[in-house]
Each structure stands twice: as structure tokens, then as C-alpha cells.
């Protein structure tokens, strides 16, 4: 398996528009589907895990409008949602982390069950929680836990579970906002780009100091996507900071310099995508990068360079992108294994690998994925969807099959 792969499998139950989902992931995965199909909801489930661990479960729910907005609404009125992430750590140990969160009377909630297993129960570190109480653990001592918080936060103080916590909180998710990227920014910690790019100047400054070779890759791809731009650097303005771009101007001997407030949405979004992809350095790298529609505001001619950047970055960091752009997928070399089709069926999101006809067309290079998308022929495999529906809904244990 590619060494960049962190999350190998994701199982969701009753998360927003997703009733059930069981999907596997490689180094680079495109979630492809129409607007409103639920691509963003899938990516948000992973983002939810990161937020609940890095801040708190309460904050993660409140930022999404509360439990009532997170759990799926349907005629069955489920009062809970669940997430299971199967992973591979850097030391080649495999495991999974799963939890169910349910509603209490009134407006409360509780972690009904939670489980973290590395290497298998009885083979490596593990803990199992039910209703805020420790059911079983490999560790002789375990920190105090409560039903309104994820136990992995407390368990991260134990050496056995720290690698799982660190990897899950090192996932980065992006839906970039050029307006906020233009504004003067307060200097911040720049190891990890924030979700809408609100600390982009600090990230570029951090790369300038600790990973100039990574910044060089960002600059090279940026010039390919936006040929007039010859570079970018962090610029201090009093107690604030911003970005300064070097841009070629007709008749000028040297590139002119422009602050971020003078740059186009497309240029800023391109920089944000590239910074998200290549922000790693020798001391710290994201375990996974998820990007919403990286092609937005870019000229179709930039798609090939963007696709190349996504592929290059996925050699070091696992990448998941959402897209409905035929131009981004218009490459005969793009493997069908890197595509997951997302559709909305009567308001419910379904996610699966491509059907056999689409996979064969791509494998034989009869059509690119982009051409099939234009023909509305990138559809999920019905056999896989049927199999997902028949599987047991338990998120816990060694195998869900």
C-alpha cells in the first residue's frame, strides 16, 4: 500500500444526508457527483472527527447547528449517528476508531459507544467505552472519562493511543475563501493551513523558514496555473501580515509586486489549494488533506496542472477532493480506482466505486472520467450499493462484513 495512505476505510451511519456508507480510500480519491449530492457531507464527517478531538465534541456539534442538524433526518427518525475510521499508522500498524453519538431527553447527547483498536483486540492497544464507562482496555490504568466527551482525547495522554490522536487531529479540510485570504491577518501558528485559508500568510511564512523546497513546489505550480505570477511571499505590515505576489507586467524589466488584496479569486484559491497540498515539512505533515472543489474559479486550461499537483502531493500525504468538473477529470491516465461516485437518491446520499461499464471504459481508455461525467455516465456500482445496504450496521468489532 502507498505509504501516504492514512484512512483506508470510512463507515458512516446517519450522518447528515448519509444514511449508510462504506467506502475505501487510496492515496488520491476523487468524490464525484452533482451539486447537492452530498459530497461535502461525507468530507464533513471526517472533519467532524478532527474538530471533536482537537477542540471538543460540544464545539464540533455546535459549529454544525447541534445534534439535530448532524444526525440524518428521515421517516425512521434515528436519534444517533456513528462514524468508523479504519487507518494505517506510520509504523505500518493498522486499526480503527469508531463511535456512536445519540440524543438524550431534552437537548443533550451522549457518546453511546466508543472504540479504538490498534493491531486487533488482544494483539495491541485497545479500549472500549459504553455509556461513559470503560468496558475493556489493554492498559492497566485509564484516565477518567465522561459520556459527553470522546474518550480518545483523555486517552491521548497514554503513549499507546497518542499516535492515533495525533494522526486524526493532523487531518486538514479546506473550502477556501478568497475574501478572507485577501484581508490583513494576525500572525498565527502556520504549521497547518486553516479551513478557509484565514492563516495563509503564516503558512507561507512557515514554509519560507522551515521548508523552502516545499514552497518552491508551490511557487512552481502556481506559475503553471497562473503564468503571470512569478512568486509569492509573506509580507509584514505593522502588527499584521499578508501575502505579496510578484507578477509580470508588459514593458516592465522586473516583476511588479502586488498585495493579496489586489489579486483575483482564482489566483488566491490556486495558492490556497497548493499550500494545502504541499504544506508538509520535515517535522510536521498533515495525515490527510480534503479539499472542496479545488477547480473553483480556475480557468479550465489550469486543470492539467492542478491534476498533476494533486497526484504529486498524494505521494506524501493522502488526498481526498470533491469535484463535479469534467475538465479536472479529463485524463485517460486517471485510474477508475481513484474515483468514488456520489449520488442523491430521494434525498439520501449514496457513495460507491464506479459501475462495471464505467470502469471498463476508463480501463480500456475508450473514455476519460471527464468525458463520462459530461455524458452523465459516472454512476455508482449498484451491486456495491446493495451490498452496503445488506451489511450489519454495527460500527464496532474487527470486521463489518
Image (cartoon, helix red, strand yellow):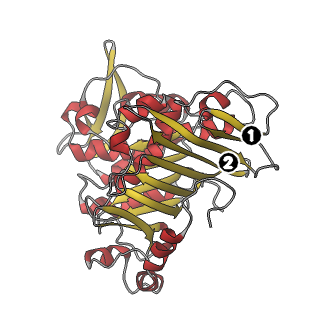
- What's the mark number on residue 136? 1
Q: Is residue 258 visible?
A: no
Q: In the picture, residue 198 is in which quadrant?
A: top left
Residue density around tag 1, few if under 14, some if 14–19, many if 20 or more, within 10 Å: some
Q: Is residue 255 left or right of residue 116?
A: left
Q: Residue at x 50, y 49 (%)?
A: 82
Q: Secondary structure at mark 2?
A: loop
Considering only vertical position in the picture, is 194 above or below 222?
A: above
Q: Which residue is at the front of the view, 175 or 17?
A: 17
- What's the mark number on residue 89? 2
Q: Residue at x 25, y 60 (%)?
A: 35
Q: Is residue 65 visible?
A: yes
Q: Position of residue 375 (x, y in %)?
A: 26, 79
Q: Position of residue 83 (x, y in %)?
A: 52, 49
Q: Quadrant of the C terminus?
A: bottom right
Q: CA distance from mark 2 to mark 1?
A: 22 Å
Amino acid at each position: 500500500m502507498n505509504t501516504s495512505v492514512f484512512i483506508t476505510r470510512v463507515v458512516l451511519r446517519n450522518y447528515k444526508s448519509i444514511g449508510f456508507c462504506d467506502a475505501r480510500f487510496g492515496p488520491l480519491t476523487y468524490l464525484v457527483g452533482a451539486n447537492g449530492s452530498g459530497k461535502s457531507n461525507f468530507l464533513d464527517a471526517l472533519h467532524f472527527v478532527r474538530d471533536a478531538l482537537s477542540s471538543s465534541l460540544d464545539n464540533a456539534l455546535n459549529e454544525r447547528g447541534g445534534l439535530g442538524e448532524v444526525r440524518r433526518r428521515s421517516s425512521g427518525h434515528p436519534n444517533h449517528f456513528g462514524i468508523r475510521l479504519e487507518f494505517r499508522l506510520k509504523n505500518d500498524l493498522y486499526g480503527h476508531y469508531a463511535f456512536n453519538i445519540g440524543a438524550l431527553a431534552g437537548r443533550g447527547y451522549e457518546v453511546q459507544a466508543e472504540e479504538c483498536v490498534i493491531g486487533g483486540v488482544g494483539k495491541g492497544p485497545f479500549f472500549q467505552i459504553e455509556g461513559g464507562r470503560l468496558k475493556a482496555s489493554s492498559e492497566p490504568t485509564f484516565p477518567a472519562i465522561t459520556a459527553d466527551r470522546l474518550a480518545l482525547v483523555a486517552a491521548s495522554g497514554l503513549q499507546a493511543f497518542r499516535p492515533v490522536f495525533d494522526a486524526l487531529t493532523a487531518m486538514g479540510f479546506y473550502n477556501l475563501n478568497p475574501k478572507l485570504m485577501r484581508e490583513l491577518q494576525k500572525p498565527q501558528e502556520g504549521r497547518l493551513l486553516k479551513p478557509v485559508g484565514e492563516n495563509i500568510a503564516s503558512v507561507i511564512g512557515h514554509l519560507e523558514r522551515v521548508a523552502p523546497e516545499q514552497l518552491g513546489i508551490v511557487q512552481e505550480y502556481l506559475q503553471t496555473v497562473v503564468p503571470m505570477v512569478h512568486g509569492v511571499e509573506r509580507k509584514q505590515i505593522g502588527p499584521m501580515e499578508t501575502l505579496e505576489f510578484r507578477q509580470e507586467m508588459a514593458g516592465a524589466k522586473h516583476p511588479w509586486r502586488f498585495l493579496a488584496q489586489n489579486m483575483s479569486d482564482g489566483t488566491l484559491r490556486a495558492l490556497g489549494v497548493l499550500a494545502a497540498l504541499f504544506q508538509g515539512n520535515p517535522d510536521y505533515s498533515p495525515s490527510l488533506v480534503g479539499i472542496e472543489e479545488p477547480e473553483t474559479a480556475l480557468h479550465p486550461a489550469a486543470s492539467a496542472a492542478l491534476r498533476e499537483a494533486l497526484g504529486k502531493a498524494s505521494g506524501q500525504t493522502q488526498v481526498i477532493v470533491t469535484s463535479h468538473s469534467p475538465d479536472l477529470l479529463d485524463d485517460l491516465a486517471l485510474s477508475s480506482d481513484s474515483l468514488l461516485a456520489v449520488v442523491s437518491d430521494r434525498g439520501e446520499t449514496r457513495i460507491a466505486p464506479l459501475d462495471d461499464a464505467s470502469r471498463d471504459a476508463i480501463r480500456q481508455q475508450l473514455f476519460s472520467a471527464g468525458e463520462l461525467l459530461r455524458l452523465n455516465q459516472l454512476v455508482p456500482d449498484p451491486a456495491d450499493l446493495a451490498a452496503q445496504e445488506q451489511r450489519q450496521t454495527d460500527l464496532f468489532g474487527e470486521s463489518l462484513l
